[in-house]
């Protein structure tokens, strides 16, 4: 059970099974995620951890992580041994954070860093990222309860075999003070094309999110811009409240954003049905015919297809298809999918734009 | 043989047979045109012509015009009796000038105005436009000789039955002094997408045209902007030179523009084949999928398809197909083609954009 068993191409072809169904409120909510930050009591935090102790820690958690059975058998990938392309794919699948993806500094490849993830990709645990362990559970659509339950199950199973650093006053201790307490961050990825079209409405949502002490961000977490109208809402507070309170706030807010987005969609659909149909149809035409396609362009067109599916304007399409393409058009996946024809190092931008266009033409041909 | 025999819809469906072959140098030259301005000796110029005398003049020329047999039997359309939609179609087919097309002022509908044109549309004669008679002959591609020969044949046949106003010193007398002498204007419609891409090269062409005393204009003659990279070159001088000199100058200049455009196309094709393929493919995708399409947008995409055909990037396409669509996507043709589903008055812009998109989708489906 090592990374050597993972063929990047096969991995890129078989996109996370949990994404193959739209999930609850799948017209607006792409996915729900819960992560828990945990540290072992008898090791210094990662920032103070000597390389040999990091390796030792990884060895120690490997077996308990491998023993988990929620979501199928676990894969174990030591980051410093994994090829750059696989790490990039893991990042694009949201199985590892930016810190564990390939970078210029190659801090990512520090010894002892690893990721364990379940066969269905609903559960993953990063080792020696910011904290010793970062447990993550995913679910399709708007389903924080399931994600939370999965994370909690993993947490409890691990707690039986590992001693976590806990303070009776504060709760779980974490490397960064912003995570102390529950160590919980819950987030929901939203697709808000209608609200994005009506700027002032979207600003109302931003204000509401800020007032609640939550955060709204683009697709890849902090500091990233919304591409293709995908946004992520997450909690900021981890201390002084319990897990149920934290997720309940988020659930309420997301539910109201979902209603808001749907109302704007309905109005747009009534007032501008023809223009929306034109928009969806043009995007489909463009994705089926372009020979070069940038990521941003592709995401913008896929955003149009997604709303096209939800409004019944593209009968041959489906939310899971768009979800899958949104992942597969990314750099690592593209490269892995074309491994048989292209060199294994990361292709240059124009070659990637060509591969991306070819993938989209292939996948969308004949789907009317 | 009146306009009542002309069904606008059938007229719009059956586009000018001479446009159904590309003609010589059809990759760059769309069409060649020669027009002769002639006036009857015993009538005042149109600007001084009383309405009843204009009607009398029309009656007098109707029979000689109808007797012409070059290019098939002649149609006779009295402008004041023709429906607006037919007049618009005639304008879009270049069979009448802007002055005879429907306008707010309706000067066009003055009594005595008419057009006679041959079944194949290579020959047309406007009656009581700026001059009593405006003879026009067209040919596909770069073939001024044929157009000139046709115009001359018509001129000679009419001269046997009508007495033209001629001065021994100046030549043919015309209403506007700029036409005195030969009364000849020769023009060539060019498609210059490659030169249009390389601004400084196109400016060189403009300068060369000006130096030669010729004029370069957009698609619909004086004052109009080039849409879809279509330009018209014509002579300005009509006095003091004979017809052969005038057309020879134009022929030389056009031949050099054709070489120039082809050289730039070759360079672009070598250096940016992939980008050009993308451009052609995207335009095809867009024309096949859009639900609304403005004229300018459609012409720009059709321009890409035309160069796509010429560079072998769109095997299922052809120059005549693009030529035909360029005419049929225009307002009058669109309206005439949809007469069975839409009201007969001119539809509003958004309805036209919808009809245009539907026509293009229908015509371009399955042509890969």
Image: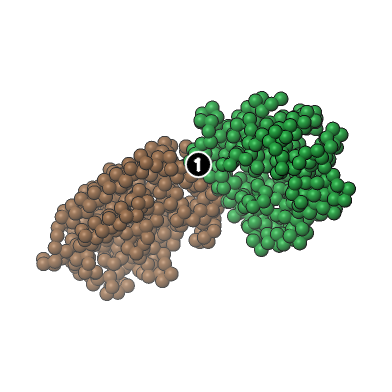
Chain colours: A green, B brown
Q: In which quadrant of the rendered image does the N terminus of chain A lie?
A: top right
Residue A287 position, x and y percent, is: 55, 42
**Chain letter for mark 1:** A
Question: From the viewer's perspective, is B130 left or right of B354?
Answer: left
Q: Nearer the viewer, residue B307 or B90?
A: B307
Question: From the viewer's perspective, is B4 left or right of B173?
Answer: right
Q: Nearer the viewer, residue A165 or A97?
A: A165
Question: From the viewer's perspective, is B68 left or right of A54?
Answer: left
Residue B121 position, x and y percent, is: 33, 51
Q: Residue at x 59, y 37 (%)?
A: A332
Residue A326 in view, yes or no: yes
Vertical comparison of A170 with A1: above or below: below
Q: In which quadrant of the rendered image does the C terminus of chain A lie?
A: top right
Q: Residue at x 56, y 34 (%)?
A: A335
Residue A3 position, x and y percent, is: 66, 28
Q: Residue at x 82, y 53 (%)?
A: A239
Question: From the viewer's perspective, is A84 left or right of B244?
Answer: right
Q: Nearer the viewer, residue A115 or B233?
A: A115
Q: Residue at x 58, y 51 (%)?
A: A279
Can you tell which quarter of the image residue B38 is in? bottom left
Residue B252 position, x and y percent, is: 20, 50
Q: Which residue is mark 1?
A: A349
In the structure shown, which secondary structural element does the residue marked by tag 1 occupy?
helix
Residue farthest to the left, as pictured: B168
Mark 1, other Cα within 10 Å: few <14 / some 14–19 / many ≥20: few
């Amino acid at each position: 059970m090592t990374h050597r068993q993972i063929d990047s191409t096969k991995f890129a072809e078989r996109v996370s099974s949990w994404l193959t169904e739209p999930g609850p409120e799948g017209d607006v909510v792409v996915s729900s995620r819960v992560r828990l930050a945990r540290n072992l009591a008898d090791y210094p935090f990662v920032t103070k951890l000597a390389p040999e102790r990091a390796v030792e820690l990884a060895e120690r958690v490997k077996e308990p992580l491998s023993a988990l059975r929620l979501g199928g058998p676990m894969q174990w990938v030591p980051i410093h041994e994994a090829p750059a392309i696989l790490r990039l794919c893991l990042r694009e699948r949201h199985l590892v954070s930016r810190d564990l993806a390939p970078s210029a500094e190659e801090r990512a490849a520090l010894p002892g860093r690893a990721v364990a993830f379940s066969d269905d990709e609903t559960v993953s645990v990063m080792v020696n990222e910011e904290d010793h362990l970062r447990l993550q559970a995913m679910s399709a659509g708007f389903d924080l309860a399931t994600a939370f339950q999965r994370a909690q199950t993993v947490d409890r199973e691990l707690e039986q075999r590992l001693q976590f650093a806990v303070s009776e006053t504060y709760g779980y201790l974490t490397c960064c003070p912003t995570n102390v307490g529950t160590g919980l961050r819950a987030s929901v990825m939203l697709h808000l094309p209608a609200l994005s079209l009506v700027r002032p409405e979207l600003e109302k949502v931003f204000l509401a999110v800020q007032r609640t002490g939550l955060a709204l961000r683009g697709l890849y977490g902090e500091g990233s811009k919304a591409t293709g109208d995908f946004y992520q809402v997450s909690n900021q507070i981890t201390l002084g409240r319990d897990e149920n309170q934290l997720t309940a706030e988020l659930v309420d807010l997301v539910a109201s954003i979902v209603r808001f987005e749907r109302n704007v969609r309905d109005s747009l659909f009534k007032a501008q049905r023809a223009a929306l149909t034109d928009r969806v149809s043009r995007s489909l035409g463009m994705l089926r015919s372009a020979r070069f396609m940038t990521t941003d362009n592709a995401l913008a067109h896929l955003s149009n297809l997604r709303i096209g599916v939800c409004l019944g304007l593209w009968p041959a399409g489906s939310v899971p298809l768009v979800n899958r393409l949104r992942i597969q058009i990314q750099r690592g996946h593209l490269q892995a999918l074309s491994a048989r024809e292209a060199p294994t190092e990361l292709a240059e931008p124009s070659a990637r734009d060509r591969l991306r266009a070819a993938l989209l033409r292939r996948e969308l041909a004949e789907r009317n």
